[in-house]
Amino acid sequence: MSEYHPLSLEEAVALARTIPDHFRQDAELSVEEIGDGNLNLVFRITDSTKGKGLIIKQALPYAKVVGESWPLSLDRARIEREALEIQHSHVPDLVPAIYAYDNELAITVMEDLSDHTIMRKGLIEGQEYPHFAKHIGRFIASTLFYTSDLGMDQQAKKEQLGRFINPDLCKITEDLIFEDPYRDSPNNNFSEDIRPDAEALWHDDELRLEIALLREKFLTHAEALLHGDLHTGSIFATRESTKVIDPEFAYYGPMGFDIGAVIANLLLNFAAQPGWSSNSEELHARRLRLLTMAQGVWKHFETHFRDLWNRDLVDVMAKTPGYQDMYVQKVLRDAIGFAGAKMIRRIVGLSHVADIDTIPGAELQHQAKLTALKIGKALVKRGRFASSIDEITGIARQAA
Ligand code: ADP
Ligand code: MG
Ligand code: MG
Ligand code: MG
């Protein structure tokens, strides 16, 4: 198409007009840039007479991080789009449709999901998502199983793995999740009121050993094509529907990482709820729902994953009695450990979550941070020895 440059609003509209079967020739289109502007531009183009528009997401060649610029490969737009296409082939109802793309311009044109709400916002507001665990459990099980050596031809998998080498984005995870919080790094970003608790992480060798082991898995265990950034800000939801967006961190990694990401973000909201619930009854109900959802994510994943294994396994050796149970137990333990790591980094690391950082009132915010850190540390330390997802409930309740 044309050489890379960030699209202007006018160019975004012109591009939207070229998408077949979408807007009428004479439609009056309006455009808005709705991204948060750190890594990517997101344009929403709408026809004044129609509710549903189009989204154009464009990667920027850098990330704005604490006032500085951090170069990031534009190839991640291709990676994000190809990951979306693969996910679409397995769970078409759980991701946006793609209408067009351009690798040179690093853009993807996709379905407008503005009739959904970003789940993080919904959870802060106390929204209920009765089908979420079932949906996301199926999303994770299908996308991971069918991209692993269990569910796809192993030679084809090796080739696919090569299309998802994503060094810049993996490095963000390696630094921000598995390194910075455990040392005195300039990338850390915590409030002074939790300095003693943050500094304690740097000297907790039991914790640091588990983090080193989780980091090793992230660096070396190419089990399946992960989403790679599956927090509640990458999920659009309504009461009935769930859509997963933003897989720009996709790469071949350990399955437990995606499951852990979802559980971590539900538990961050759990930790934050005293800051959002208006009375103790509501707090109790919301927290119970969050714990049930977190357990449900695992349970639906496990059920669906075992079904796929029993139905569509391509690896003859994996039929060996006992192997499935051991595999599932490994994924469970990884998921619990990664969930803990993801909670800790949102309290002391560079990037935080609105669930906690926008709580009105310093004392409630302080308490939420301590609760999240406590849960996170306990999950990391427990992960490698866990035998059931039910253990996360005890850990969360004890810390609260
Ligand atoms: P980033 O990688 O920069 O975080 P996201 O893909 O998460 O980009 O998109 C950023 C924001 O843009 C989302 O939080 C959402 O508000 C909006 N957005 C992204 N994709 C869509 C979509 N398909 N429909 C509607 N809004 C979207
Ligand atoms: Mg963002
Ligand atoms: Mg995002
Ligand atoms: Mg993103």
Image (cartoon, rainbow, N blue to C red):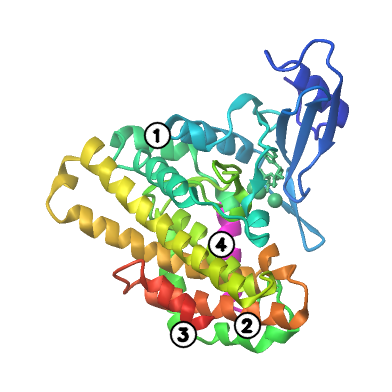
Q: Within 10 Å of the Cα at label 2, are there few (<14), some (14-19), or many (20+) other Cα atoms?
A: many
Q: Amino acid at mark 2?
A: Ala
Dot in front, 4 or 3: 4
Q: Quadrant of residue 2?
A: top right
CB atoms of marks 3 and 1 within 8 Å? no
Earlier along the polypeptide chain: callout 2 or callout 4? 2
Secondary structure found at label 2: helix
* Residue 343, above or below 10: below
Dot in front, 1 or 2: 2
Earlier along the polypeptide chain: callout 4 or callout 1? 1
Q: Which mark is residue 265?
A: 4
Q: Residue furthest left?
A: 321
Q: Amino acid at mark 4?
A: Asn
Dot in front, 3 or 1: 3
Label 2, on which residue? 198
Secondary structure found at label 4: helix
Q: Amino acid at mark 1?
A: Glu
Label 1, on which residue? 159
Q: Gap in Å between the C-alphas at discs 3 and 1?
A: 39 Å
Q: Position of residue 33 (x, y in %)?
A: 82, 39
Earlier along the polypeptide chain: callout 4 or callout 3? 3
Q: Within 10 Å of the Cα at label 4, are there few (<14), some (14-19), or many (20+) other Cα atoms?
A: many
Secondary structure found at label 1: helix
